[in-house]
Image (cartoon, rainbow, N blue to C red):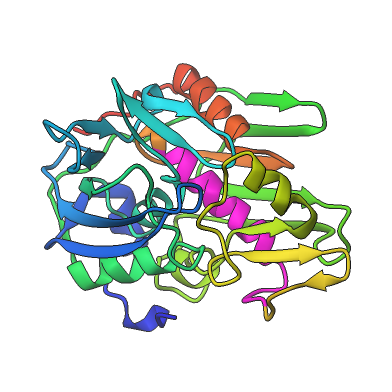
Amino acid sequence: MASPDSLTLPTAKAITSTQHTLASSVSRQGVGLHSGEVVTVTLAPARRGEGRSFVRTDLPGQPVIPAALEAVDQTVLSTELRQNNATVRTVEHLLAALVGTGIDNARIEITGPEIPLLDGSALGWVEAIQAAGVVAQGSGRSPLVLAQPVSVQDGDAWVVAFPAETPRLTYGIDFEVAAIGQQWFSWSPLVDPYDAQGFVAMVAPARTFGLAHQIEYLQRQGLIKGGSLENALVCSHEGWLNPPLRFDNEPVRHKLLDLIGDLSLLGGLPQAHVVAYKASHRLHVALGRSLQSALACPPEAV
């Protein structure tokens, strides 16, 4: 695991006022959670104002898929983007790493249909970004200012965003499995990413998790073909199958990681306090779409 002190990343002030991209290209290879395919991802610099986008280098014409809400295709156990016939799945961990380390503009080249899961967290992507280096790109970005509360709900699951002077994300989960139970976690992206309370130390290491009694069903549905005890935490009614956890509340921290990645499809995190409870990728994206309509300032770079 990377030490937060070893990472050279933008300060909190720089993240909120200046655009950044990668100083050089860097590649990582791994297995997709749902497809089980081994793919290579190359993170490359992009021009100021270009934003984040995926490039399917394995397909004819190397189609570009924007990391934008308009490109969301489906949200079953991950977030998948589509541009015409080209898709890329499970984008949320990598996008969260880019947002959490202040990368506004990046070209993400991929040799297959799904972003590798790596160890189930965003830490491997943070380490790749650190290896590539980060450079500032001049004048700042337009803030995503929320003028009024926005909410979405599905049964007892919901996400709400309140106008706030500074951005914050808070997440709650509640599972019948005793080892997870009810957990809450709150984090502000204004904290320096390499600070003791920052993204690299507090959010990025949290791994994806699943329930043991659901695994067989998900496999029958053609999902989690690449899942294993090496890249996901698995919990049964008796406890965790592959301890130790990195945090006592690692599951809820990972849900907040997913939320960061999904909301990044707005173009950046909103200047709001976003609170989620028992939510899903579908609700994350639904809130993002509602926010897009409600934002007082459009998510475009200047």
Which x, y percent locates residue 255?
62, 52
> In the rendered image of this protein, does residue 8 appear above or below residue 181?
below
Q: Position of residue 219 (x, y in %)?
A: 63, 47
Q: Position of residue 41 (x, y in %)?
A: 26, 55
Q: In the figure, residue 88 lies in which quadrant?
A: top left
Q: Residue furthest top?
A: 293
**In the depicted structure, whether residue 235 falls above or below residue 298:** below
Task: Place residue 150 in its image quadrant.
Answer: top right
Stretch of the chain drawn in magenta: 245-264
In the displayed structure, does residue 132 sit left or right of residue 117? left
Taking the spot 10% from the left edge, 43% from the top edge, the residue there is: 47
In front: 248, or 146? 248
- Regarding residue 134, the answer to whether it shows in the image is yes
Image point (83%, 71%), residue name: 239
Measured as percent of width and height from the top left, residue 169 is found at 58, 48
Q: Residue 279 appears in which quarter of the rendering?
A: top right
Q: Decide if residue 10 is in sight here.
A: no
Q: Is residue 251 left or right of residue 40?
A: right
Name the dominant secondary structure of the magenta segment: helix
Inspect the magenta stretch and tell me whether residue 256 lies in it.
yes
Q: Where, quadrant-wise, is the N terminus in this rendering?
A: bottom left
Asked if the magenta segment contains residue 50, the reply would be: no
How many numbered marks, from 0 up?
Answer: 0
